[in-house]
Amino acid sequence: MDTKGLSATAVAVFEAISTRRSIGRLTTECPDRDLVERVIRTTSFAPNHRHTQPWRFLVLAGDARVRGGEVLERSLVRRLEDPETPSSLEVRQSERAKFLRAPVIVIVAIEPSNAPNVSLDEETAAGAAGVQNLLLASHAVGLAAVWRTGDSVRDESVPTEFGFAPSSMIIGYVYLGYPDPGHVGKPRPDRLPIETTTRWEGWT
């Protein structure tokens, strides 16, 4: 990324944005709670329409990840035609173990405001902006993170099973920890060039 002529602060921001990547392979080492709390606090600076601050978080570590995996499994069972077949039991076991892939799981939800003129799409966008802040802050302090979703985020029963308000929506699960050294340094997927994604009008 071209940083010519930018201030040191601007370069740091550009570098953080351009070098951040999703890293799903993590070590078993659990970051300190204070560090995780610091990166989550950055979500409060995300833009949000009408200052509703709709983001909500549940941070799982240790055995709480097992209980979280049980929520995922129950969601899967509700979607399976026959949850007791050998193949279904195997898939259920895999679903139940998903949160054990990372030492920390941040479950991200939005609790939409019921104030007048607040729209759900704006609340969802605010939550996504908050997640991006979390991902960038994690990268800045040397943590690895990946934002995952899946069918369970569209299960209307899952938010309350995780203890969120009935009106809430899950927008993703952030797997958080320290990067596996064997996975660091692999090339990032190519990004579309600005010439492909951007049109300019009214410029001389």
Image (tube, rainbow, N blue to C red):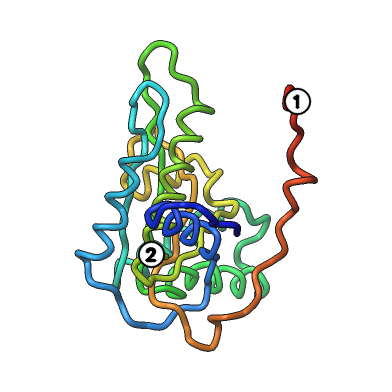
Residue 18 x %, y %: 55, 60
Mark 2 Cα shell of 10 Å, populated few (<14), some (14-19), many (≥20):
some
Residue 83 x %, y %: 61, 62
Side of 138 where 189 appears, left or right: right
Looking at the image, the residue that sits furthest to the right is 196
Q: Which residue is mark 2?
A: 140
Q: CA distance from mark 2 to mark 1?
A: 35 Å
Q: Which element type, helix, strand or loop, lies under badge 1?
A: loop
Callouts 2 and 1 close, C-beta under 8 Å: no
Q: Quadrant of residue 191?
A: bottom right
Q: Which residue is mark 1?
A: 201
Q: Quadrant of residue 110?
A: top left
Q: How many marks?
A: 2
Residue 90 x %, y %: 61, 75
Foreground pick, 87 / 102:
102
Foreground pick, 70 / 152:
152
Task: Identify the amino acid type marked 1.
Answer: Glu
Foreground pick, 19 / 131:
19
Looking at the image, the residue that sits furthest to the left is 34
Tell us which disc is closer to us: 2 or 1.
1
Name the residue at 33% across, 36% down.
165
Q: Which element type, helix, strand or loop, lies under badge 2?
A: helix
Side of 198 where 109 appears, left or right: left
Name the residue at 75% across, 42% down.
197
Task: Identify the amino acid type marked 2.
Answer: Ala
| Residue 112 in the image: above or below residue 15 | above
